[in-house]
Amino acid sequence: MTNTEKTKFYITKEDGSKEEFSIGPEGSLGVLALGAVGVKAWKQAKAKDRKEKKIKNLKKKENGEKS
């Protein structure tokens, strides 16, 4: 996952409708506006990004490439 790829999640509004949000590992002020739900989604996006980068680096090392 690169910084341009974002994790999508949905919040349910008081009227029952759902709204889609996209959060990248770099975060945004909108995340803070969403409160705990936004911060949780941001942390998940960061963890996913770290995991994917770690896997990518391990594959590079296995193939003898420099990171």
Image (cartoon, rainbow, N blue to C red):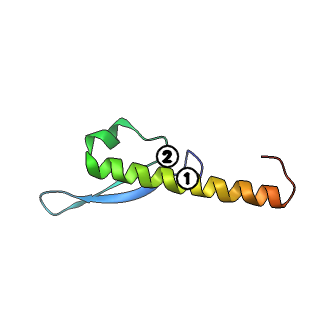
Image position of 24 with respect to 14: above or below: above
Q: How crowded is the residue under tag 1: few (<14 C-alpha within 10 Å), some, or many (20+)? A: many
Image position of 16 with respect to 40: above or below: below
Can residue 5 be seen in this snapshot? Answer: yes
- Which residue occupies 12% across, 59% down? 15
Expressed as whole percent of the image width and height from the top left, the position of residue 40 reads: 35, 52
Residue 14 location, quadrant? bottom left
- Which residue occupies 32% across, 49% down? 38
- Which residue occupies 15% across, 63% down? 16
Image position of 51 with respect to 36: above or below: below
Image position of 28 with respect to 13: above or below: above
Left or right? Give the position of 49 relative to 58: left
Expressed as whole percent of the image width and height from the top left, the position of residue 25 reads: 49, 46
- Please give the residue where the numbered disc 2 appears in the rendered image: 25
- Please give the residue where the numbered disc 1 appears in the rendered image: 49
Q: CA distance from mark 2 to mark 1?
A: 7 Å
Left or right? Give the position of 33 relative to 40: left
- Which residue occupies 48% across, 40% down? 26
C-beta proximity under 8 Å, tags 2 and 1: yes
The kind of residue tagged 2 is: Pro
| Marked residue nearer the N-terminal end (2 or 1) | 2
The kind of residue tagged 1 is: Asp
